[in-house]
Image (tube, rainbow, N blue to C red):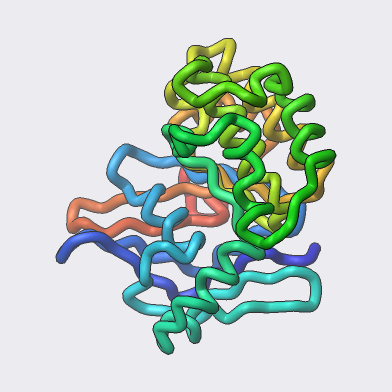
Amino acid sequence: MDRVVLLDGVVAGKGERFRVRMSGFRVGAGETVAIVGKSGSGKSTILDTIAGILRPIEVRAFRLMSGAASVDMGKLWAADDQRALRAARARHIGYVLQTGGLAPFLSIEQNIALPLWRDGGQDPGWTRHLMEKLGIAGLARRLPRDVSVGERQRAAIARALAGKPDLVLADEPTASLDSAQAEATMALLTALARETGVALLMVTHDRALVERHGFRMAICQSADNGQSDLLSDPAAEGVP
């Protein structure tokens, strides 16, 4: 299986004491992976690091890959090449924030099309297809404030997929939804991931939900000293 992200010997953190270590972590093309762990264990820190938003403290190997092409994110951070980092994010990553993160002054359709505008192009057929698949085609001209929380979250999922990235990161995408909405949204998200061939890496507290949808598990395990470790193969590490 081709890989879309590789992290080895990567340490990231926020503040002076909190650190997350990521070693031997890989996500394959088209794979669905869920990072689970206690609140405050560093799950969102991991996503922000992979997204190229948070500068890592230490890096042995950190690559984003698309087929035979590879971007050495560690080297880009070492060189502080912000333009290349932005280009790598735009090319490889789609991000679904916990709160949706839609621009309040743009319509639902305009929000979804943002990644295409950023790349200097338009693909209204693809945008419309995503909205239809997610059941929000009838909301195209509405502003985010005029739709429900669940509808905003589905629009955020469509926006993350609009640029046809290799990897979609999702930070607790069902946290603000009731159980029925969460189940429906997860089914739509995983179906679209399969259709597009995109890899999906999600942070969640709802382990049962992602297990029902066939995600591979990775555990973010925290210690009392403010350090956490991302265990990509929990069974091998003896994690229940």
Instruction: Tell me which corner region of the image, top left, top right, bottom left or bottom right, holds residue 232.
Output: bottom right
Eyeballing the image, is 232 above or below 66? Answer: above
Taking the spot 68% from the left edge, 64% from the top edge, the residue there is 4
Taking the spot 59% from the left edge, 74% from the top edge, the residue there is 63
Eyeballing the image, is 184 above or below 96? Answer: above
- Residue 194 in view of the camera: no
List x then y, in percent, for residue 52: 47, 66
Taking the spot 65% from the left edge, 47% from the top edge, the residue there is 200
List x then y, in percent, for residue 151: 57, 21
Q: Given the current orientation, which residue lies at the most extreme left position?
A: 16
Q: Looking at this view, is 97 or 145 the one in front? A: 145
Eyeballing the image, is 205 above or below 65? Answer: above
Q: Quadrant of the N terminus?
A: bottom right
Instruction: Tell me which corner region of the image, top left, top right, bottom left or bottom right, holds residue 213.
Output: top right
- Residue 55 in view of the camera: yes
Q: Looking at this view, is 81 or 207 the one in front? A: 81
Say left or right for 64 vs 18: right
Eyeballing the image, is 183 above or below 124? Answer: above
List x then y, in percent, for residue 189: 68, 33
Instruction: Tell me which corner region of the image, top left, top right, bottom left or bottom right, holds residue 131.
Output: top right
List x then y, in percent, for residue 8: 51, 73
Q: Given the current orientation, which residue lies at the most extreme bottom position?
A: 79
Taking the spot 36% from the left edge, 70% from the top edge, the residue there is 55
Say left or right for 70 vs 129: left
